[in-house]
Image (spheres, rainbow, N blue to C red):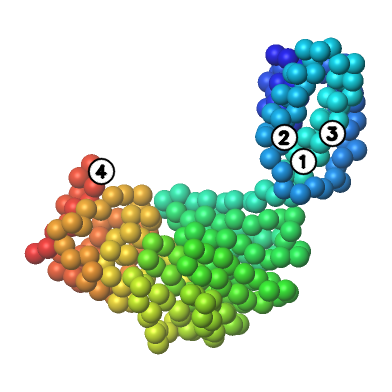
């Protein structure tokens, strides 16, 4: 492997043991390490190091054919730039991302002592290095937040932004389903350019393109944190989707009306009990196969 390829793989932290030995044997090894250590505090605008390296490498190949005497200094300059851009990218631009799979829940501590409980099949992302200046998380799925008092705290979703100062609330953002419930403090929900303020026990829900108003929440925490999913007049398709997430199963509801409304709950630890909790109130039956639950109307 030539010098340029070794340097590029080193910048990407992708050297195998044999390549690491070859890299350490380079004439410029000590210079590169020294420059890397001295550039720990270096910051630069967002930059694509692979594109820059390809451009510089092409130039180096041309220079090498003409035996240019200043090839080595130029290589050192290229290494300085690439190291700087690489350090900036890895230490400042990368977000911390936490993702749950079906039937999994995770508790997360944020840098300011705020906490997040992430429900099944959800994704949470935030930037630790920028947290003191900008308390922002992005969410896909469902999460319960307990926010430490301080500067504004934003939860960004594909459907809207939830802003608070210090409070406890739940955000659920799935396909055609956006719901925010305030449990403590106050919450501002920005949806389609309009802001709605919630107080404890109040809920904002936009489901299948319709705004659901005047819903109340009497619980102190969302029921899913206690291994139970609860619904009030929700289309059956959303209940089935949640059942699939909590049990990592597939449900075939093609023969039933998945728009009919369901009010009730199902447990997360007993599939048969969960299925009965959903089907009996709606007059449905079900068949269990190896890979699929088939719902049937009576």
Where residue 202 sits in the image (x, y, percent)?
48, 84
Precedes in sequence: disc 3 or disc 4: 3
Classify mark 3: helix, strand or loop: helix
Quarter that holds the C terminus: bottom left
Question: Marks 2 and 4: CB-CB under 8 Å?
Answer: no
Classify mark 2: helix, strand or loop: helix
Residue denoted by label 3:
80
Classify mark 1: helix, strand or loop: helix
Q: Quadrant of residue 289?
A: top left
Q: CA distance from mark 2 to mark 4?
A: 49 Å
Q: CA distance from mark 2 to mark 3?
A: 12 Å
Q: Quadrant of residue 234?
A: bottom left
Q: CA distance from mark 4 to mark 1?
A: 48 Å
> Which residue is more in the foreground, 173 or 142?
173
> Which residue is more in the foreground, 230 or 81?
81
Where residue 142 sits in the image (x, y, percent)?
48, 63
């Amino acid at each position: 492997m030539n010098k340029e390829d070794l340097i590029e793989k080193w910048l990407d932290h992708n050297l195998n043991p044999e390549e690491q030995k070859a890299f350490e044997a380079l004439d410029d090894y000590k210079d590169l390490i020294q420059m890397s250590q001295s550039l720990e505090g270096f910051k630069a605008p967002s930059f694509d190091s692979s594109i820059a390296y390809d451009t510089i490498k092409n130039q180096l190949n041309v220079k090498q054919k003409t035996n240019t005497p200043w090839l080595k200094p130029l290589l050192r300059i290229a290494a300085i730039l690439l190291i700087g851009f690489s350090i900036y990218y890895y230490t400042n631009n990368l977000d911390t991302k936490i993702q749950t799979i079906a039937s999994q829940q995770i508790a997360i501590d944020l840098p300011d002592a705020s906490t997040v409980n992430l429900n099944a099949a959800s994704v949470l992302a935030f930037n630790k290095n920028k947290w003191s200046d900008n308390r922002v998380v992005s969410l896909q799925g469902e999460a319960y937040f307990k926010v430490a008092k301080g500067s504004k705290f934003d939860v960004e979703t594909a459907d809207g932004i939830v802003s608070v100062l210090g409070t406890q609330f739940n955000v659920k953002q799935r396909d055609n389903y956006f719901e925010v419930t305030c449990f403590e403090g106050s919450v501002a929900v920005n949806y389609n350019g309009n802001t709605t303020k919630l107080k404890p026990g109040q809920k904002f829900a936009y489901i299948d393109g319709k705004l659901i108003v005047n819903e109340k929440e009497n619980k102190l925490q969302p029921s899913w944190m206690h291994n139970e999913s609860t619904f009030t007049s929700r289309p059956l398709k959303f209940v089935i989707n949640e059942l699939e997430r909590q049990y990592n199963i597939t449900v075939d509801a093609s023969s039933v009306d998945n728009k009919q409304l369901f009010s009730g709950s199902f447990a997360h630890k007993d599939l048969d009990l969960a299925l009965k909790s959903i089907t009996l109130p709606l007059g449905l039956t079900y068949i269990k196969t190896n890979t699929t639950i088939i719902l049937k109307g009576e």
